[in-house]
Image (spheres, coloured by chain):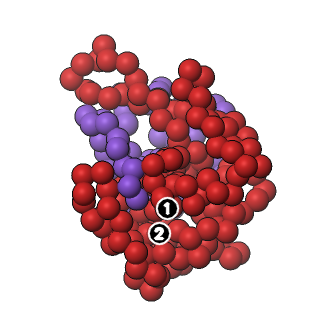
Amino acid sequence: MIDLAKVRLEKLSKALPRYEGKWVAISAKNQIEASGDTYKETVDQVSNPDEVVLLRVTPSDASLSPAGA
Amino acid sequence: MKFGYQKFLLGLQDPRKPLVARPLLPVYLVNGERRTRSPYYALLDSGADRIIFPADLAEELGIENIESGLLEPTVGVANQRTNVYFHRLAVQVAGSDRALPVDVGFSREIGLPLLGRSFFAHFKSVTFSEPKEEMELKN
């Protein structure tokens, strides 16, 4: 089971914009282990899904205001 | 349960800008005996009424046709309307053994998974601490 307390996405600040719109699988070492257009496509590339957490990457050039859903 | 916010770069053009902190909660989505293989981050959104996830998460749980769910359109802050199809599923916070029964809406037009106040209703309180950049969910 991944130690989520070790996942600090700020350490991936420079890398994440390249994955805008995609899912990325991130390890406790704060490394991107896989990426894909869908959750399934991304997890399928990971050898141990228990050891990653997934993130859908949002645009880095705009703030978020999703309220209203 | 306490979780720290996650920080992101906002504005590629100016690296001197501070990172923006967001309340992202690691969760699993559950459909009967099936559960997403890995946790994923969803935004805790106190301004949202519902739980709405990208449609491809339904695929992971064997829901091939999201339109088989109950249609309830949603409208965002810019008045953009989106069709959302709700299914009775469960959400499990990573690190918790409780799968919370909830209606989850799926949309092909949403990018970031959202946990609105229909999720908050399962907790005694949901607290956002901006100075500490952390959120706390109390049962």
Q: Secondary structure at mark 1?
A: loop
In this view, the residue farthest toward the left is B13
Give the chain letter at badge 1.
B
Residue B7 position, x and y percent, is 47, 29
Residue A22 position, x and y percent, is 36, 51
Task: Tell me if A30 is positioned left or right of B123 in this view.
Answer: left
Specify whether disc 2 shares its chain with disc 1.
yes
Q: Amino acid at mark 1?
A: Arg
Task: Tell me if A44 is positioned left or right of B19 in this view.
Answer: right
The residue tagged 1 is B50
Q: Colour of chain B?
A: red
Q: Secondary structure at mark 2?
A: strand
The residue tagged 2 is B105
Of the residues tagged 2 and 1, which is closer to the observer? Answer: 1
Q: Quadrant of the N terminus of chain B?
A: top right
Q: Are the residues at dot 2 and dot 1 in contact (C-beta closer than 8 Å)?
A: yes
Asked if B30 appears above or below B24 in the picture, the reply is below
Which comes sooner in the sequence, label 2 or label 1?
Answer: 1
Q: Quadrant of residue B11?
A: top left
For marks 2 and 1, give the CA distance: 8 Å
Q: Which chain is purple?
A: A
What residue appears at the point 36 percent right and 66 percent down from the top-left corner? Answer: B74
Give the chain letter at badge 2.
B
Q: Amino acid at mark 2?
A: Gly
Total tally of numbered discs in the picture: 2
In this view, the residue farthest toward the top is B16
Which is more toward the observer, B128 or B99?
B128
Residue B84 position, x and y percent, is 39, 71
Q: Quadrant of residue B90?
A: bottom right
Residue A9 position, x and y percent, is 49, 32
Task: Note whether residue B35 is visible.
Answer: no
